[in-house]
Image (cartoon, rainbow, N blue to C red):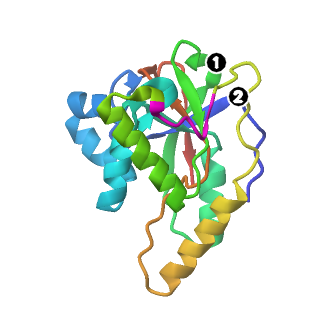
Amino acid sequence: MSMLRRMPCVWHWRTPQFTGNHIVDLYKLKMLKPELFTTSKGKYETTSARKLLLMNNPIPPLDCLWNAAIHTSTVHPQLVHDAKRAAGLPVQPTEYFEIPVDKLREFPCCIYHLPTPTLRMKLRIVWNVLMYRLGWKGLILHTDYEALDFDNWLSLEEMPPSTVATYEQWANEMKAGKLPQVLTYQNVPHVFVKGAIPVEGLKIIRCE
């Protein structure tokens, strides 16, 4: 696996059809660029029950729903590609925006430690969805969220071992003729951003 230095950056997938001056959340994308929304939302397509939960899952520190925030990765995407390839999963060349966290200071942000999808985690999401819909925000559980320390934060040095193990499990299932639901960023912490991030000056990287 590639070894890359830790950086004060996060990364966001750049769709091949990207146009415009800002990175926006999926809700805004649907209104502004419906054709790009159709492409982008595929990253979050899952089983109907899981999709329903994720689409309605609130992000308590940002007081918004899951798709009303921009999702950025805390690990360099080349590490993701290398880990998937090493496990035997298919990988396609992809472009990403590299976003210095210093450029996010003006936006509400938080770190989300994406947990393993256990029954307890799913029940917590169901609870939060219900509390948010009922307007009882004081009862929403803030588990797995952390404030972003802009001055000291650095990207992950390597892929979480649990993510790598999951890649290997999915690759073995594929070899057995099954069709596992590959969630690339399972167990990888995210930085959620509420707002529209200007792309001017952002580096675009291509990962093989």
Q: Specify the label residue 207 is tagged with.
A: none
Residue 144: percent from left, percent from top: 60, 41
Start and end of the magenta stretch?
139-146
Residue 23: percent from left, percent from top: 41, 27
**Residue of label 1:** 102
The foreground one among 195 and 61 is 61
Look at the image and tell me whether residue 108 can be seen: yes
Q: Residue at point 68% right, 20% down?
A: 150
Q: Amino acid at mark 2?
A: Pro
> In the drawing, does residue 42 fall left or right of residue 117?
left
Residue 141 lies in the magenta stretch: yes
N-terminal of the pair, mark 1 or mark 2, is: 2
What's the distance in space between the residues labelled 1 and 2, CA to CA? 8 Å
Q: Residue at point 51% right, 17% down?
A: 107
Residue 70: percent from left, percent from top: 45, 32
SS class of the residue under badge 1?
A: helix
SS class of the residue under badge 2?
A: loop
- Dot 1: within a 10 Å radius of its alpha carbon, few (fewer than 14), some, or many (20 or more) residues? few
Residue 128 lies in the magenta stretch: no
The image quadrant of residue 99 is top right
The reply to whether callout 1 and callout 2 are in contact (CB within 8 Å) is yes
The foreground one among 74 and 207 is 74
**Residue of label 2:** 8
Q: Quadrant of the C terminus?
A: bottom right
